[in-house]
Amino acid sequence: MMVAGALALGGIVGSFLNVCASRLPNGRSLWMPGSACPACAHPIRWYDNVPVLSFMVLRGRCRDCKAPIAWRYPIVEFGTALLFALAYVHLGVSWELAFALVFLSALMVITVIDLEHQLIPDRITLPVIAAGFVGSVILGRPSWLDSLLGILVGAGLICAIILGSRLVMGVEGMGGGDITLAAMLGAFLGWKLLLLGLFLAVLVGAAVAVALLAAGRKGGRDPIPFGPFLALGGAVSLFWGKEILQWYLRGFVG
């Protein structure tokens, strides 16, 4: 029953994250006007705005003008629902869960915005960095010192990569939003799990970049958003980071 509640809450939050992803990059209000079809501008009825289910009932088309509804909407709603349920299974009903849901919601909306606009808004990352640090002070997991070091290490490493890329290749490679996103990961995960998250992000990002180049989908100097890979590394580290580190230490160090 509680898992079903987490799924429902995640779907509702995912619907709001879709609004954020559509409006924040353009500087529009999140609250007014209400949601409307982008093709015909007809206001969306409440019963056509039920996460995932409405998309299925409408068969992916606007009720009024029959224009197709972007698949991004149900994917974000369903993905957020799964993340919320997974967080509940791992953390139970706790303050840790509440802070984790804030973290996961931020990762989801940042992923969408970066994929669509190659932008990571400070309006999201900076408040969530503060929330992560406050959570470490209140909960002690990670400790406030680990959280602070995570913020500094995350921002510092991405800054170093940007400066190194500029000096060696003449391009920045990453943007300022990646700096604040890495700091956000550090605030919630602490510096150790941050390093794991960054490693996973680079590993998966490099594999995807090679695949896109090999398929001819991207050129050598075409930008590839790094935010989604940071978000993936952060989510994996949140759920399974400690187990991955223990496995590594047992198998390769101890």
Image (cartoon, rainbow, N blue to C red):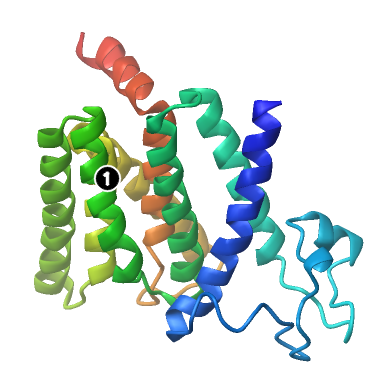
Residue 167 in the figure: left or right of residue 102: left
Where residue 121 appears, as percent x and y from the top left, is: 34, 71
Q: Nearer the viewer, residue 136 or 208?
A: 136
Measured as percent of width and height from the top left, residue 41 is found at 74, 90
Q: Amino acid at mark 1?
A: Gly
Furthest-bottom residue in view?
40
Q: Residue at x 77, y 59 (%)?
A: 50
Above or below 74: residue 148: above
Do we see residue 173 in this rendering? no
Task: Say which quadrant the C terminus sits in.
Answer: top left
Give the secondary structure at mark 1: helix
**Residue 61: x %, y % from top left:** 85, 74
Question: 117 or 205: nearer the eye?
Answer: 117
Pointer 1 residue: 132
Tell me if 135 is positioned left or right of 244 in this view.
left
In this view, the residue in front, 221 or 10, is: 10
User: Residue drawn at (65%, 29%), measured in percent from left and top?
Assistant: 3
Query: Could you tell whether 232 is left or right of 15 in the image?
Result: left
45 is higher (above) or lower (below) than 125 = below
Image quadrant occupied by the N terminus: top right
Residue that appears at 78% across and 87% down: 42
Q: Quadrant of residue 110?
A: bottom left
Q: Where's residue 98, x and y in %?
A: 43, 38
> In the picture, residue 171 is in which quadrant?
bottom left
